[in-house]
């Protein structure tokens, strides 16, 4: 049985050391087990990267993956996943981005591209349906993301080529450097850019001329028509078009759940000046969208006045906007935009970067470090000069920037003096711009996420619904529908983790698949059947997603992680949100009972937090589990 | 419509520019062409200017002097440079072209009215694709809608519409056939393989006559025609027979179907 649509059907293997490549057929059985994208990447990563492989070691693999619907008109199927052992966290690394790179990879005829080894000099890859060209990139060394993109497109003479770039921060070994496509579309998290740069690959350019076919075009088109109509009728549709994720800044602030001055409170007094609404009113020029998406939720902006006049870019999303406003205490919208732009050009994760800067500011406020340690920069909240200077220093690993450039966990370890408890991360990965104490389901999601502190592994946005009846029906607790309650959140997070795995394995967008709940597993199976002709069914799709989550758990277990690592920084479980946090004031995260419920829902051992043998058997992961034990004993 | 060539026929005085007999400019549609390395007198041009749109058009008024006027003289009394207007056939309809050629060959004879009118008459001009790049999100769903409508595959490479981008500047420009009144692609085809659909006025490719020479692609002023890598034949919008799939798919109203200034299909969604 092989797929007759959807999938490209080929995996591209690139041996960087020998500058050789070959293709392998995509295994349809693996496709049914993991769907695509993140799922298939995890399968390959688990099998091919041995426990304990350092992230920057040539033995690490860097895997680009897309899903069976990429390249079609499926709404938001524009993304690609990049997976590897993370050099930042030492556990599972995985990140994805939208834009146009993912579909182009599919048009070139690949479901996955696996970069193996390390090139002996700096190169970039040109991937077409005919294979790989290894092109010298000495001239691109140190060029920022935008300049690299422009140089490669110019060299290829084809502005339809899509380019995924490791910026100068990655070249300097910044551990939270990402891979950037379409200038600002960042697979930002877990240091995938650092992995690429360590392989001496400056960029991956791809140009695809092949069509993407679907097995049953009429059926597929009919399904799309229904789905698009539902999306356009969704109550969120208009506000997502107008503001996209930037709408979260004001709405989270209203709830008292906006990360402010490094999570010291949940409300930012200047939120109206730096909100998505303010950005739209002052600087937005038009809506932008990823490939084939019916929701132009992104935006292009141009700063029209002040010291940053002329700054123009697509972006930012909520994480960048709040990261360089409320999180660092900055009230100047244009400065925040400039900070995001710098991160994009250097190729750094805005979450990691804004965390290390706000962390340093809190350390200074508490007298743990002085301005002198920060190369004389004044580490006061919202200090624009400091913010921009620190971004540059981190990107170039200069002075105090070098202390911060390995991520907040490593920075705290270097600084010591009790700073460790103020380092806001889970498993070494910094997290988002919402206040976990104001969103209990999200807080649990951060604690258990397979790539460390990450909201995009679960996004249990249902907890904003306040629909207790649905909470009872769907998750066995009315509380599941209320963000400040903790009951039902284990089952809630389990469900949404699998929905996120679905979105990532389709490489579709979580705005539609997860937040708008545009499709469920049954509906996904219908699309997959029509696209691929393979025998997907709803239960099987759900199981594939659950399998991915469990395999990721095994991956991290192989690195020695257990329940003891599923924790949040003390602040969120011990210190109530202060009184100025409005409706969230007084809240702390009841993590332990949520964890118990979560492991029970998952069929995992309550003590170890590891998948039970019964669950592994149910999911057909016995071999993987056995391999994990074998590797551990052979270490 | 006609294209024009305006030739310096004779210089009876002294032109200090200097223009020389045989120098010319051409007017093609709304474009003024000056031959490479040549120039044209601004003072003469500004006096010729009102005649240009008049001479481009077919005037059927029996008593009008314009159809018979072929020459104008430069307003500089010292120069007395005489310019001659030559009409060049420019319709993309073979029958009209034949008529227009006759007219050009007999410059003092008025063109006949028959066959010189719009194929669909003046009552209801046909709809065109309208593009508003200022609201285009750059999503390129139009490309996939196009390839799916025509070939049941998703492939930007065989789409008849494509979105040109400048990401750093935030520009997204849908490039698509505009159903020109006088279609240069049709004119350029040496095989007569391109014709106009009588109902929609779209350009239709006769794949059997087409040799894939790309003259149409080179002639298109909008860069909207390219050859399919798969078939070697030009990809030209056929308006999906009157309900364009790209318009149906466009989420922002950047591509609409209608007449400028009127309510158009696909509009008003944003």
Image (cartoon, coloured by chain):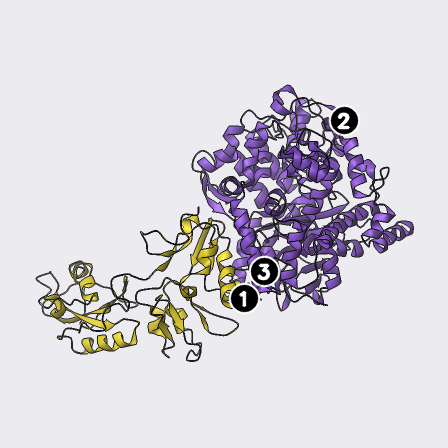
Q: Are marks 2 and 1 on the same chain?
A: no
Q: Colour of chain B?
A: yellow
Q: Colour of chain A?
A: purple
* Left or right: B178, with A420 as reference point: left
- Separation of disc 1 and disc 3 at Cα? 11 Å
Crowding at dot 2, Cα within 10 Å, few <14 / some 14-19 / many 20+, comes out as few
Residue tagged 3? A220
Crowding at dot 3, Cα within 10 Å, few <14 / some 14-19 / many 20+, comes out as many
Residue tagged 2? A417
Residue B85: image x %, image y %?
Answer: 17, 69
Discs 2, 1 touching: Cβ within 8 Å = no
Mark 1 or 3: the one toward you: 3
Residue A572: image x %, image y %?
Answer: 72, 28
- Element type at mark 2: loop
Residue A242: image x %, image y %?
Answer: 49, 41
- Chain letter of disc 3 in the image: A
* Mark nearer the N terminus (3 vs 2): 3
Residue tagged 1? B152
Q: Is residue B193 above or below residue B256?
A: below
User: Which image quarter: residue A264?
Assistant: top right
Discs 1, 3 touching: Cβ within 8 Å = no
């Amino acid at each position: 049985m092989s797929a007759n649509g959807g999938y490209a059907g080929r995996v591209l293997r690139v041996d960087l050391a020998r500058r050789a490549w070959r293709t392998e057929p995509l295994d349809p059985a693996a496709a049914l087990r993991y769907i695509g994208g993140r799922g298939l990447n995890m399968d390959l990563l688990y099998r091919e990267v041995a426990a304990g492989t350092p992230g920057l070691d040539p033995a690490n693999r860097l895997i680009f993956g897309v899903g069976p619907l990429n390249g079609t008109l499926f709404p938001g199927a524009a993304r690609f996943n990049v997976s590897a052992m993370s050099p930042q966290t030492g556990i599972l690394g995985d990140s994805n981005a939208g834009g146009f790179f993912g579909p182009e990879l599919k048009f070139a005829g690949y479901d996955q591209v696996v970069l193996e080894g390390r090139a002996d000099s700096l190169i970039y890859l040109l991937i077409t349906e005919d294979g790989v060209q290894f092109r010298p990139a000495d001239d691109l060394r140190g060029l920022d993301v935008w300049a690299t993109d422009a140089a490669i497109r110019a060299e290829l003479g084809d502005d339809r080529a899509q380019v995924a770039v490791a910026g100068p921060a990655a070249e300097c070994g910044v551990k939270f450097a990402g891979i950037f496509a379409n200038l600002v579309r960042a697979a930002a998290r877990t240091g995938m850019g650092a992995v690429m740069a360590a392989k001496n690959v400056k960029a991956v350019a791809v140009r695809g001329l092949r069509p993407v076919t679907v097995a049953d075009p009429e059926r597929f088109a009919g399904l799309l028509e229904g789905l698009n109509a539902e999306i356009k009728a969704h109550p969120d549709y208009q506000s997502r078009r107008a503001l996209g994720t930037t709408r979260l800044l004001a709405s989270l602030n209203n709830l008292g759940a906006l990360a402010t001055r490094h999570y010291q409170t949940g409300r930012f007094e200047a939120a109206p000046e730096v909100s998505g609404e303010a950005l739209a009113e002052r600087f937005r020029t038009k809506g932008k969208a990823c490939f084939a998406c019916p929701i132009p939720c992104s935006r292009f902006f141009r700063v029209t006045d002040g010291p940053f006049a002329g700054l123009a870019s697509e972006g930012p999303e909520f994480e960048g906007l709040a990261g360089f406003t409320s999180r660092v205490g900055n009230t100047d919208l244009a400065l925040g935009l400039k900070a995001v732009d710098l991160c994009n050009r250097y190729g750094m994760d805005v979450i990691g970067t804004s965390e290390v800067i706000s962390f340093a500011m809190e350390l200074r406020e508490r007298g743990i470090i002085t301005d002198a340690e920060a190369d004389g920069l004044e580490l006061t909240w919202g200090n624009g000069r400091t913010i921009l200077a620190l971004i540059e220093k981190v990107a170039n690993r200069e002075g105090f920037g070098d202390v911060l450039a390995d991520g907040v966990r490593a920075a705290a370890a270097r600084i010591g003096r009790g700073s460790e408890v103020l380092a806001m991360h889970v498993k070494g990965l910094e997290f988002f711009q919402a206040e976990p104490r104001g969103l209990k389901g999200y807080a649990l999601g951060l604690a258990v996420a397979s790539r460390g502190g990450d909201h995009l592994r679960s996004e249990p946005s249902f907890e904003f619904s306040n629909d207790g009846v649905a909470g009872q029906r769907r998750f066995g607790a009315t509380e599941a529908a209320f963000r400040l309650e903790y009951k039902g959140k284990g089952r809630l997070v389990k469900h949404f983790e699998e929905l996120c795995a679905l979105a990532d394995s389709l490489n579709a967008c979580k705005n539609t698949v997860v937040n708008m709940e545009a499709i469920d597993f049954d509906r996904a199976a219908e699309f997959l059947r029509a696209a691929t002709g393979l025998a997907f069914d709803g239960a099987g799709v759900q199981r594939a997603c659950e399998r991915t989550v469990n395999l990721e758990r095994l991956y991290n277990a192989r690195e020695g992680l257990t329940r003891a690592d599923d924790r949040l920084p003390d602040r969120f479980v011990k210190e109530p949100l202060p009184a100025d946090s409005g409706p969230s004031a007084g809240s702390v995260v009841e993590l332990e009972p949520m964890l118990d419920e979560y492991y029970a829902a998952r069929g995992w051992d309550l003590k170890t937090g590891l998948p039970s043998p019964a669950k592994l058997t149910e999911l057909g992961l016995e071999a993987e589990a056995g391999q994990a034990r074998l590797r551990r004993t052979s270490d | 419509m006609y294209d024009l060539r305006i030739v310096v026929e004779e210089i009876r005085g002294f032109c200090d520019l200097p223009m020389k007999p045989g120098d010319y400019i051409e007017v093609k549609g709304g474009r003024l062409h000056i031959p490479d390395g040549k120039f044209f007198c601004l003072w003469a041009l500004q006096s010729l200017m009102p005649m240009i749109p008049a001479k481009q058009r077919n005037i059927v008024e029996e008593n009008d002097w314009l159809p018979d006027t072929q020459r104008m003289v430069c307003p500089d009394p010292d120069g007395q440079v005489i310019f001659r207007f030559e009409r060049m056939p420019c319709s993309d309809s073979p029958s009209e072209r034949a008529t227009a050629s006759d007219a050009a060959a007999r410059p003092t004879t008025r063109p006949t009215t028959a066959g010189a009118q719009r194929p669909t008459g003046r009552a209801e001009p046909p709809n065109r694709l309208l593009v508003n790049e200022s609201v285009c999100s750059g999503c390129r769903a139009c490309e996939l809608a196009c390839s799916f409508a025509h070939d049941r595959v998703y492939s930007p490479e065989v789409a008849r519409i494509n979105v040109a981008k400048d990401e750093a500047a935030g520009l997204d420009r849908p490039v698509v056939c505009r159903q020109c009144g006088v279609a240069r692609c049709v004119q350029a085809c040496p095989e007569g393989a391109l014709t106009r659909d009588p109902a929609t006025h779209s350009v239709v490719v006769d794949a059997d006559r087409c040799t894939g020479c790309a003259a149409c692609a080179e002639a298109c002023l909008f860069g909207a025609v390219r050859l399919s890598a798969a078939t070697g034949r030009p990809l030209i919008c056929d308006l999906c027979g009157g309900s364009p799939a790209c318009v149906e798919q466009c989420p922002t109203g950047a591509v609409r179907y209608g007449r400028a200034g009127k309510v158009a299909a696909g509009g008003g969604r944003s």
